[in-house]
C-alpha cells in the first residue's frame, strides 16, 4: 500500500482553493522531491479538470507533461454517478456492487457508448500527438479531486499498462476513503486537502468551481504546446 501524504494545514477544511490553479500551487510542495527529475518522472493530467492542475505541477516541478485518458461509466438515468471506468488501452473496471443494478445488456451498451466518447475526447485533445513513453518512469497522475476514487484506479492501471515503473497520484482534494482505496493500488498518494465524513464533494474544496468544457482544455493544451516549442 502506498503512503498517503497530506498538507495537515488543510485537513478537514472546505473552500480552501480559489480555483484549480491555486489548488496546484498548494499541491506542488508535496511533490518537491521530484523537482527537476525530468528524465525520471512525468506528470499525467486526466481531462478535463485535471489538466490545468497538471500543467501547473509540471511547470513548478520542471517535469514533462502528458495526458492520460480514462472515462467513467455513467448510470443511464443518473449521469453524475458511475459504476466503473475504462481507459484508452482497454482497462475496464466495474464496481460489481453498483453494476449489479443494471442488466448485462445495459452495461455492455454503456461501455460501448463511453468508449466512443473517450475516443472523441482523445481525438479532440491529443490529436496527432503521440503519448509519451512511460517505460521505466515514475508516472504522477493528476486530477482535480478524488470522490470515490474508482476512475483513478483505471488511470493507475492504464499508466502501468503504458510501462510506468511507479505510479503516484496527486490531487488537490480527496475523501479519506477514496485516498485509502487509491493508495491500495498506487505507489503513493499526495493530497493537499484530505476530508473525511459520509458526504464528500470535490467542488466543496473550491470557492471558484465550474466544469471545464473541452474547447477550454484544448486551448490550454495548444498554449502549452506553443510555449513548449
Image (cartoon, rainbow, N blue to C red):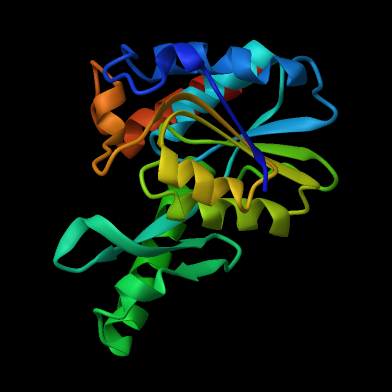
Q: Is any atom of residue 18 visible in this view? A: yes
Q: Quadrant of residue 65?
A: top right
Against 102, is 85 above or below? Answer: above
Against 91, is 21 above or below? Answer: above
In this view of the protein, which residue sits in the foreground, 121 or 212? 212
Against 20, is 73 above or below? Answer: below
Q: Which quarter shows the C terminus?
A: top right
80 lies left or right of 44: left
Task: Give how far across and how far down residue 9 sits, in percent.
Answer: 45, 11
Q: Quadrant of residue 144?
A: top left
In this view of the protein, which residue sits in the foreground, 213 or 172? 172
Residue at the left extreme?
77
Residue visible at 38% across and 57% down?
A: 72
Number of numbered tags placed on the structure image: 0
Residue visible at 50% across and 19% down?
A: 223
Task: Give how far across and how far down residue 92 sits, in percent.
Answer: 51, 69
Residue at the front extreme?
197
Q: Is any atom of residue 134 visible in this view? A: no
Task: Give how far across and how far down residue 74 sits, in percent.
Answer: 28, 62
Against 224, is 75 above or below? Answer: below
In this view of the protein, which residue sits in the foreground, 113 or 75? 75
Residue visible at 57% across and 68% down?
A: 90
Task: Give how far across and how far down residue 98 sits, in percent.
Answer: 31, 71
Amino acid at each position: 500500500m502506498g503512503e498517503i501524504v497530506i498538507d495537515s494545514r488543510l485537513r478537514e477544511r472546505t473552500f480552501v482553493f480559489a480555483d484549480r490553479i491555486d489548488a496546484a500551487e498548494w499541491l506542488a510542495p508535496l511533490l518537491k522531491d521530484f523537482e527537476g527529475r525530468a528524465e525520471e518522472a512525468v506528470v499525467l493530467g486526466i481531462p478535463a479538470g485535471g489538466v490545468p492542475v497538471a500543467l501547473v505541477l509540471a511547470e513548478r516541478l520542471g517535469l514533462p507533461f502528458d495526458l492520460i485518458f480514462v472515462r467513467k461509466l455513467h448510470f443511464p438515468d443518473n449521469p453524475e454517478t458511475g459504476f466503473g471506468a475504462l481507459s484508452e488501452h482497454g482497462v475496464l473496471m466495474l464496481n460489481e456492487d453498483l453494476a449489479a443494478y443494471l442488466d448485462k445488456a445495459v452495461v455492455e451498451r454503456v461501455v460501448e457508448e463511453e468508449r466512443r466518447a473517450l475516443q472523441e475526447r482523445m481525438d479532440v485533445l491529443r490529436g496527432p500527438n503521440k503519448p509519451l513513453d512511460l517505460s521505466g518512469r515514475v508516472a504522477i497522475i493528476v486530477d482535480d479531486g478524488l470522490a470515490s476514487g474508482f476512475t483513478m484506479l483505471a488511470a493507475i492501471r492504464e499508466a502501468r499498462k503504458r510501462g510506468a515503473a511507479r505510479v503516484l497520484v496527486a490531487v488537490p482534494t480527496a475523501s479519506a476513503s477514496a485516498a485509502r482505496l487509491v493508495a491500495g493500488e498506487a505507489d503513493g498518494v499526495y493530497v493537499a486537502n484530505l476530508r473525511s465524513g459520509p458526504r464528500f464533494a470535490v467542488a466543496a474544496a473550491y470557492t471558484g468551481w465550474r466544469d471545464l468544457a473541452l474547447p477550454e482544455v484544448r486551448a490550454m493544451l495548444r498554449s502549452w504546446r506553443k510555449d513548449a516549442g
